[in-house]
Image (cartoon, rainbow, N blue to C red):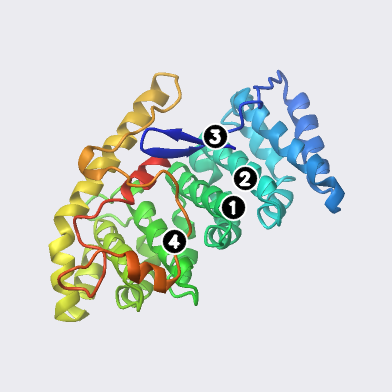
Amino acid sequence: DGLADSGDLDVLAPSADVKPLRVHTERDLNKELESVALDLRAATAADWTTRQAALRRLQALLLGGAASLGTDSAPLLNGLRTLREPLNAQLADLRSQIIREACCALSLLAAALGEAFDSYTDFFYGNLIRQSCISIAVISTSAHLCMRALIARTKPDRTAPKIAASLTDRSAGVRARAAEYLELLARVLQRPVDGERGPLERHADVLVSALRSALRDAVAEVRALARAAFWALNAHLPQHCRNLMDALDPQTQRILREEEPAANERSAALAEAAALAAMAVANGGAPQEARPSSRASSTSRRAPPPAPQSQRAARAPPHASDGGGVGGGDLSHLGHLLSAL
């Protein structure tokens, strides 16, 4: 079904029948991408299988090494300009098969192009976070895994304001997803050297303001994810986070300090996964699948959308200080963060 299990982790992978398709010239690649774009613009309901086939053909091109043509993947990047709008339209489709294939294609593009794909991550963010919160599991899981993969691979600091806006969304599900994405973004971005401005510095005010709201959210799960995001962001904006900590109520301050050791564990585990991925790429192979340590293993093989508040309240383990919020030792979402690498 396109979602391949890897130990305790889920990774978004092409279907088994998608085989590598190799092209040898820039001209051939342009023709293939133009054909894909044309098929993706098929608008009628009867043409959905044509669009599905086009998305799989794009995946096949990427598996066949389309990004290796030219200098710095320039032919592929140039060809993607005509695919941006059609791909985004597939993410808003009503068919789970189409959304799953589109998410898989985007994940492959991010893996192939890395930070050169960051502007596309920013462009696709809106549809992906909306789809990650709906009740259809195939769609929400595909969109969620795709969004994590795009953040981990492309490190899109330009998307920080959009994530901040989602932290104050009317939907609790969107707010929870945004907090998780903010934590992941802060952990994959390189920490600034002392005395230098980091990539998140220009977004500091909007991020801190949105995080303050999330730390006071009415939903325990959102608060718990916001606390994890706080410690991740602290590595980039220590003075801003210190000021935010001082402005919080004593109970929230106490919980944050209790959870700091667990946050450090998350940082170490993610850094280890990133190092393994970088080593594999440097050796000319695909990144190894990062497996979290036993203390940071995932408890779920799927990433369902955040449950309604009533369901979350029923299942959330009690915290001594936060009325049902997730405690500092709960690293269950770390496996999902690491799977994006």
* Disc 2 and disc 1 in contact, CB within 8 angstroms: yes
In the image, is residue 299 above or below residue 128? above
Which residue is label 3 attached to? 13
* SS at badge 3: loop
Instruction: Give residue 275's quadrant in the image.
Output: top left
Q: Is 95 left, or right, of 164 in this rendering?
A: right
Q: Residue 139: which disc?
A: 1
* Disc 1 and disc 3 in contact, CB within 8 angstroms: no
Q: How far apart are labels 3 and 2 at the CA level?
A: 10 Å
Q: Position of residue 266 (x, y in %)?
A: 25, 48
Q: Which mark is first along the chain, 4 or 3?
A: 3
Q: How far apart are labels 2 and 1 at the CA level?
A: 6 Å
Which residue is label 4 attached to? 177
Q: How far apart are labels 3 and 4 at the CA level?
A: 21 Å
Using a 10 Å C-alpha cutoff, classify the residue at mark 1 as few (fewer than 14 neighbours), some (14 to 19) or many (20 or more): many
Q: How far apart are labels 4 and 1 at the CA level?
A: 14 Å
Which residue is label 2 attached to? 100
Image point (25%, 44%), residue name:
296
Image point (61%, 23%), residue name:
65
* Disc 3 and disc 2 in contact, CB within 8 angstroms: no
Using a 10 Å C-alpha cutoff, classify the residue at mark 3 as few (fewer than 14 neighbours), some (14 to 19) or many (20 or more): many
Amino acid under disc 4: Arg
Q: Is 73 left, or right, of 254 in this rendering?
A: right
Q: Position of residue 109 (x, y in %)?
A: 58, 38
Q: Which mark is first along the chain, 2 or 3?
A: 3
User: Is residue 320 shown to the viewer in this render?
Assistant: yes
Q: Which mark is first along the chain, 1 or 2?
A: 2
Amino acid under disc 2: Arg
Image point (37%, 33%), residue name:
7
Amino acid under disc 3: Ala
The answer to which of 145 and 264 lies nearer the viewer is: 145
